[in-house]
Image: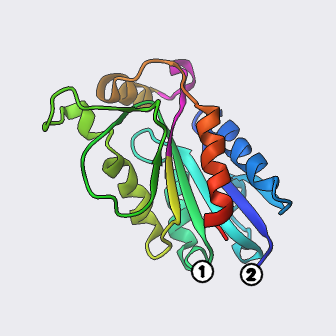
Amino acid sequence: MGSGILIAYATNSGSTVGVAEAIGEELAREGKPVEVRAIDGLAATDLSGYRAVVVGAPMILGWHRDATRFLRENRATLSKVPTAFFATAMRLTRADSPAVLPVHIDPQLARPPSSAGRLSFKERFTTPEHYLGPMLGSAGPARPVSVALFGGKLDYGRLKPVPRLFVMLVVGAQPGDNRNWDDIRAWSRSLRTSLG
């Protein structure tokens, strides 16, 4: 097993890069080597050289397809090292349901349902369980030690037409930067222990 930590990220318009870099900076404070790399540049990389891997991507039409593909292609290796996942989103609906694993939710992102006990069409697409589905399904046996759901950044002008329509009509997100840097760094510090 290697000594470094890999922070692998995918992005639609560049804002997830900043989150990945902030996580990497916090993890590097303990003196261990940390690499922050875009998933699309990791195709031929041997992941066995890392002692832990953090995978992050935005939630638009599900978790970014590069992240889900990366998890599927590297299941065997990732099941042998501690992993953690994070996603950025513009909306999250708090729903009462049992947690299947430790999930950290940015308190500024989570909103209660508009009607108690009943989720609207838009709210069903923004629950933690809906967000976790593609992550855990793609990871297979590589179960993360922690998952975080953070506020993201949205600029409609930087999205392709289909994701833009989905975010506008289904999610109903407003443009802006909702990244909570204090919360991102706090979760990152908690990873120092959980990643071993």
Measuring from the top left, give residue 188's x and y in whole percent.
Answer: 65, 50
Instruction: Identify the image quadrant of residue 47.
Output: bottom right
Count of numbered circles in the view: 2
Q: Nearer the viewer, residue 27 or 61?
A: 27
Q: Nearer the viewer, residue 132 or 30?
A: 30
Residue 152 colored in magenta in the image: yes
Q: Are marks 2 and 1 in contact (CB under 8 Å)?
A: yes
Instruction: Identify the residue at horizontal 56%, vertical 80% (top origin).
Output: 76
Residue type (three-letter) at the residue carrying disc 1: Lys
Q: Is residue 18 visible?
A: yes
Instruction: Identify the residue at horizontal 28%, vertical 32% (top origin).
Output: 112
Residue 102 lies left or right of residue 30; in this view the side is left
How many residues crowd mark 2 within 10 Å: few (<14), some (14–19), many (20+)? few
How many residues crowd mark 1 within 10 Å: few (<14), some (14–19), many (20+)? some
Measuring from the top left, give residue 13's x and y in whole percent.
Answer: 61, 32
37 vs 163: above or below:
below
Instruction: Identify the residue at horizontal 43%, vertical 26% (top origin).
Output: 164
Measuring from the top left, give residue 187's x and y in whole percent.
Answer: 60, 48
On the image, numbered disc 2 is attached to which residue? 1
Residue type (three-letter) at the residue carrying disc 2: Met
On the image, numbered disc 1 is attached to which residue? 80
Q: Nearer the viewer, residue 26 or 75?
A: 26
Q: Which residues are magenta?
A: 149-160
Mark 1 residue element: loop
22 vs 31: above or below:
above
Q: Is residue 9 visible?
A: no
- Give whichever of discs 2 and 1 has the lower sequence position: 2
Instruction: Identify the image quadrant of residue 28.
Output: bottom right
Residue 119 colored in magenta in the image: no
C-alpha separation, residue under disc 2 versus residue under disc 1 = 9 Å
